[in-house]
Image: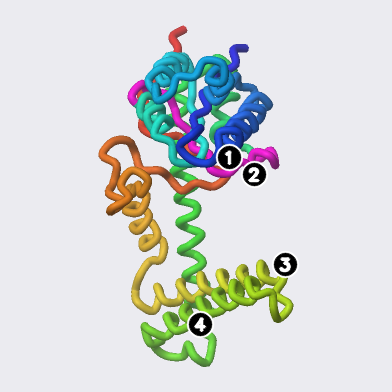
Amino acid sequence: MTKPLVYIAGPIYGSGTPNGNLRRALDAAELLMSAGAIPFVPHLFLEWEKVHFHEGDQEFWQEMDFAWLAKCDALVRLDGPSPGSDREMAFAEEREIPCFHAEDLTGAARGVDSGVHRFIAALSSGRFTRHLIAEELAEVEHSAVEEHKRDVQEMQRLVAEWISRQPFGKGEVPPHQPLLGISEEVGELCHAHLKHEQNIRGVDDKRAREMKMDALGDLFIYMCGYADANGLDLWECIEGAWAEVSKRDWNKNPENGAPVPTGPARRVPASFYSDMHPKGSYIVEEHGD
């Protein structure tokens, strides 16, 4: 069984601290090793740099990074601004090397299964090419998104039914009424932050968390009610907004966050194992007999 090679891309100097970024990369490497992959950690070049410093010579390191990346079966992108990592992702996508994004390693620490985990297992079996597996994972992800869509739409329907049974829901609900509830809950959320920051009224860390959860939950319910009262599909609102927001890059375009001209939009991130999403589109290839 051949273990797949996985390149770990992430900031070194672009954001955070070099030592902190090295630690995060090594944590990711440990998780990938436990999943059955062989990780490549370019952050370890920091040790080389301590002996032979190449000040301002980004291309010295990037040339080696690209050479190793070209031999890898997949790339994992850690969170944080990093021009070098952005170049590595673009390099990988041009060569149809599947890319996975990781902004939160807590899911991996819990051992939750993921796209990258399934990718490693399937590629290790030797029965599939990385391109075929990546396409299948993209289909799985699409199915998951559709399931979330149904969940939000079902929640909007349930809220509408509940409102119709309440005294304030008899007849036609004024379109603005749920908006007043939204404003009220935003105030509750601000209240939780303020009293926690002031350390008064018994709002300690635990109580503040409870208050925030309650306010956010109520906000979502009022949003469902507002969407229904105004003839809107809340999921379509979320999906449309994210399609625009996900294209913005305020690190590269601090003036207006204009979309980056190359590369696909980043999908919604969550945890390392539960939401490491394949990037780009891939050509289906199968081994011959």
Residue 253: x, y in percent? 30, 47
- Residue closest to the eye, 264 or 2: 264
The three-letter code of the residue at mark 1 reads Phe
- Up-down: is 9 above or below 45? below
Mark 3 or mark 4, which is nearer the start of the sequence? 4
Q: Residue at x 65, y 40 (%)?
A: 112
Looking at the image, residue 63 sits to the left or right of residue 206; the answer is left
Asked whether the residues under the numbered discs 2 and 1 touch, taking CB atoms below 8 Å apart as contact, a structural biologist would say yes
**Whole-number angstrom distance, CA of label 4 to CA of label 3:** 22 Å
Mark 3 or mark 1, which is nearer the start of the sequence? 3
Figure coloring: rainbow
- Residue closest to the eye, 56 or 34: 56
Question: Disc 3 on helix, strand or loop?
Answer: helix
Q: Which residue is mark 4?
A: 184
- Up-down: is 138 above or below 35? below
Question: Disc 1 on helix, strand or loop?
Answer: loop
Q: Quadrant of residue 35?
A: top right
The three-letter code of the residue at mark 2 reads Thr
Query: Label 2: how many residues lie within 10 Å, few (<14), some (14-19) or many (20+)?
Result: some
Mark 1 or mark 2, which is nearer the start of the sequence? 2
The three-letter code of the residue at mark 3 reads Lys
Mark 1 or mark 4, which is nearer the start of the sequence? 4
Asked whether the residues under the numbered discs 2 and 3 touch, taking CB atoms below 8 Å apart as contact, a structural biologist would say no
Q: Which residue is mark 3?
A: 206
